[in-house]
Amino acid sequence: MNFLIVTKEFKNNIFKKDNLFFFTFATIIFFLDRISKLKIINNFDEVPYYVNDYINFDLIWNIGIGFGLLSTNSSLFYNFVTTLIGAVIIFLIYFLIISNKIDKFIYSIILGGALGNFYDRVIYNAVPDFIDLHYDDFHWFTFNIADIFISLGILIYLLKDLVFKK
């Protein structure tokens, strides 16, 4: 019975104006990520590209998840993780639809980035990371625009729960 109520609520909310706005916002993030990755991939002969003393653009193909975690040569494990990420995206879409506006904003930021990296996992079997932050010999993990939005969304979500606890 509860499943039917949730499904009915979900169906009633899916095409609300604010949901369409936040899905559009997630789509814009997805395309910003795609454009940046295509620019790097198509200009690979110019990579690494020196920006300044703290940032370079250098193409790295990441077969793991964020920051190269869970990298493996096992296609079975890679496909399992990709399927799990697909399931998380479905949950993000669901939560975006049934949440309040601030949570919709947060979920749309995470969703846009997650869709960008998921697309790459499916199309390229790896995610192109290219932003190399460094100070002298210390280099942070190489990442991409999608990673920035995913991390930003998670950070906002955590701060929201810490600052605005009910």
Image: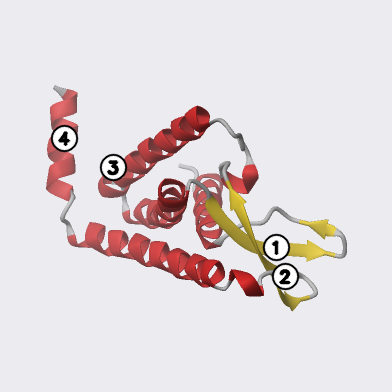
Task: Relative to 5, say whether 135 is above or below.
Answer: below
SS at mark 3 in the image = helix
Which of pointers 3 and 4 lies earlier in the amino acid sequence? 4
Q: Amino acid at mark 1?
A: Asp
Toward the viewer: 137 or 41? 41
Spot occupied by residue 109 in the image (x, y as percentages of width and height): 43, 57
Toward the viewer: 122 or 105? 122
Spot occupied by residue 2 in the image (x, y as percentages of width and height): 18, 25
Q: Amino acid at mark 2?
A: Ile
SS at mark 4 in the image = helix
Which-is-in-front pick, marks 3 and 1? Answer: 1
Which of pointers 3 and 1 lies earlier in the amino acid sequence? 3
Which of pointers 2 and 3 lies earlier in the amino acid sequence? 2
Q: Which residue is mark 3?
A: 94
Q: Who's the residue at 52% across and 54% down the image?
A: 156
Q: Which residue is mark 4?
A: 7
For marks 3 and 4, give the CA distance. Answer: 10 Å
Q: Residues within 10 Å of mark 4 (few under 14, many from 20)?
A: few
Any mark on residue 55, and which?
Answer: 2
For marks 4 and 2, give the CA distance. Answer: 47 Å
Q: Amino acid at mark 3?
A: Tyr
Looking at the image, do the residues carrying marks 4 and 2 touch, with CB atoms under 8 Å apart?
no
SS at mark 1 in the image = strand
For marks 2 and 3, give the CA distance. Answer: 37 Å
Any mark on residue 132, and which?
Answer: 1
For marks 3 and 1, give the CA distance. Answer: 34 Å
